[in-house]
Amino acid sequence: MMRAWILPMLFVFCGVGVATGPALDGSPVEAAALLLVFALLAGVHSPLVFPRSIGALEARRRSEADGRPVVYWRSGCKYCLRLRFRLGRGARRVHWVDIWRDPAAAAEVRAANEGNETVPTVFVAGRPHTNPDPQWVREQASSRE
């Protein structure tokens, strides 16, 4: 779980370091602006942007019951972030699994991607789709309601 927070925390620490210079030079507005930019970057790359993750086994079970897609993701992945933002409110219609929190999920992604942990990997009806178009994922989620 700690691994998912490394990048956001790095943004925060770098932001503090970068903002320290202007703050010491007497430019508190510039320092605050820099700190805000780094805080926003940290927030966007944090697990908080994504709907609550569940385990791979639970996601598979739920997907079999309701037919919704399962999205395997990890924080810091720009393609996962793109998928999340492009799905908008529809992101709650899919099951999200963080591969950094669940070793079984990471193994499932590696099995689907020739040994690579390539995300996002979306499973629809048990079939993997690596980095699919967000519009297609939205359609799959909507058609299975």
Image (tube, rainbow, N blue to C red):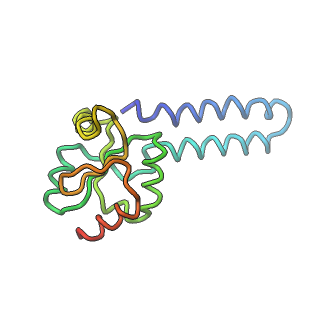
Q: Is residue 118 left or right of residue 17?
A: left
Q: Residue visible at 34% across and 50% down?
A: 52
**Residue farthest to the front, as pictured:** 114
> Residue 61 at what x, y percent from top left?
14, 52
Q: Position of residue 93 (x, y in %)?
A: 31, 63
The residue most toward the right is: 26
Q: Quadrant of residue 119?
A: top left
- Residue 115, above or below 119: above
Residue found 52% across the figure and 37% down from its top: 8
From the image, which quarter does the N terminus lie in? top left
Residue 56: x and y in percent read: 22, 43
Which quadrant of the figure has residue 133? bottom left
Question: How many labels were placed on the picture?
Answer: 0
Please say if 40 is above or below 67. Answer: above
**Residue 12 is drawn in which quadrant?**
top right
Q: Is residue 73 left or right of residue 26?
A: left
**Rendering coords of residue 57 (x, y %):** 17, 44
Above or below: residue 43 compared with residue 15: below
Out of 29 and 82, give the one closest to the viewer: 82
What residue is rendered at 79% in x and 45% in y?
A: 29
Residue that appears at 30% across and 58% down: 94
Indicate the quadrant containing the C terminus: top left, top right, bottom left or bottom right. bottom left
